[in-house]
Image: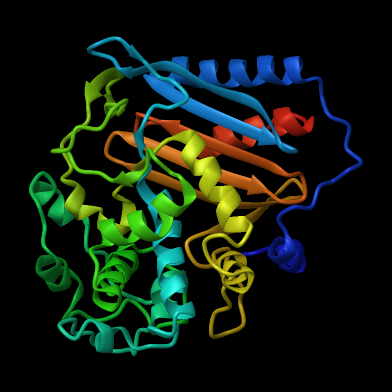
Amino acid sequence: MLSARLAILVGLLALACSTTSGTRPRPAVSRVQARVDAIVKSVMAKRRIPGVTLLVEYRGRRIVARGYGLADVENNVPAELETVYQIASLTKQFTAAAILQLVEQGKLQLDDDVTKLVPELHIRGGPVTVHNLLSHTSGLVEYNRDETIPEWGTAITHKRVLELIGDRELEFKPGEKFQYRNSGYYLLGMIVERVSGMSYADYVRVNMFQPLGMRSTSQCTHREIIAKRAHGYTTDDGKLHNARLLDMSWTFAVGSLCSTAPDLLLWDHALRSGRVVSPDAYKKMITPVKLADGTLTDYGYGLGMSVHDGHPVIRHGGSTVGFTTYLTHYPEDDLTIVLLTNSDSFEAWKVDDDISRAVLGMAPRRE
C-alpha cells in the first residue's frame, strides 16, 4: 500500500515524466560507470548469474549500455546490448496499453463485465470488470498455480485456462483488495483478440512494435529462430542449470514477449510521450488504483508506483522460468533503467535500487 507521502506524489507521477530535479549535481560519469559495473559484477558472482544486459539513461544520455557475462553458457556467447531476452511480466504494460487503445477506439469500456466479453467464463460472484483485471483487484484465482507445474512444458489452450479460472469462488469481492494475479492479464489478452479480431501477437506487432520501430520485440515461442536470443538458466544447490521448459502459450498476454534493452527504452519513451496511448490513458496506467474502502494501492494499469528514499519511481518487474527483468523510470530525475537477465535467481529490484543510488549520488542501500 502507498504511504501518505506517495499519495501526495501521485499528481507528480501523472504529469510526470519529463520533470527533472535540476538541483542535484551529477556525479562524474566515469565514476558512476565504475560503480555500476562493480554492482552488477558483484551480484553476478554471488548469485551465479550467467548474463545481464543493462541500459541506463540519465537526463537524455545513455551512461551505461552494455552486456555482462554470457547469453549462452554452453556455446560461450557473450551477453550484448542487443541480446534478446524473455521479458516476462514486463509484457503486462503492453497488454494494458492494448486494452486502453481499444477503449479509446470505443470498442470496449473499462467498466464492462468480463463475462460479456468472454461468455465462456463462469464466475461465482462479481461482476468482474475490465478495470478489475487491469488493476489486479478482480478476486480471480490464479490459473498457473503450483498444481499446474507438470503441464507447463506442453501447450495450453484458452479453454483450459478458463477451466482453471472459472466455476470457483472469488478470493474476495472485486475492488475490495489488491492481489497480483496473472489470470487477469491472460483474460485481457483474450479480450484483445475478441474485440480486435486479431491474435494477440499480431495486435501488438501491428499496433505497437512496427509503428515504434521495435524491430527486436515479438511474442516469442520456443519453435521460432530468434537471432541473439539468450538462453535461460536457474541455480540449484549453488550450481547453474538449464531452466526447465515452459511452453510460451502459458504466458500469453501475461509474459510471452521477447525484447532487447534498446527496444524497451524506445517503448518507455513512446509510452510516456503519448505515441502509444493518449496522455489521459497513460495517466490511468500510472495512477494508483483506489480500493472500495478508499485505500490506495501501489499499482495502476500494468505499471506499479513507489517512492525510493524520496524519489518517485514508475516500475514493473518480471520473473519467469530462466529469466528476470526490471524496467523503471524515475520521473523527477529523468532516469530510466532497463535490466535484463537470463537467470531466475536474480533479485532485480535490489540491483535497480543500487544502480539508481549510484547514478543519483545517493548513499548505498542498507541490507
Instruction: List x then y, in percent, for residue 365.
Output: 68, 32
Farthest residue in the top direction? 76
- Please tell me which residue lies in front, 223 or 244: 223
Quadrant into which the N terminus falls: bottom right
Q: Would you say 141 lies left or right of 2 here? A: left
Instruction: List x then y, in percent, for residue 136.
Output: 42, 69
Q: Would you say 25 lies left or right of 96 here? A: right
What colouring method underlies this structural image?
rainbow
Q: How many marks?
A: 0
From the viewer's perspective, is residue 228 above or below residue 154?
A: above
- For residue 12, say whether it is visible: yes
Task: State the residue at coordinates (15%, 49%).
Answer: 149
Task: State the residue at coordinates (32%, 70%).
Answer: 188
The quarter of the displayed image where residue 40 is located = top right
Task: State the residue at coordinates (27%, 64%).
Answer: 142
- For residue 136, say whether it is visible: no
Task: State the residue at coordinates (19%, 79%).
Answer: 168
- Please tell me which residue lies in front, 341 or 81: 81
The quarter of the displayed image where residue 190 is located = bottom left
From the viewer's perspective, is residue 92 above or below residue 168?
A: above
Instruction: List x then y, in percent, for residue 308.
Output: 69, 47
From the viewer's perspective, is residue 334 above or below residue 339?
A: below
Q: Would you say 189 lies left or right of 272 here? A: left
Instruction: List x then y, in percent, for residue 84.
Output: 36, 32
Quadrant into which the C terminus falls: top right
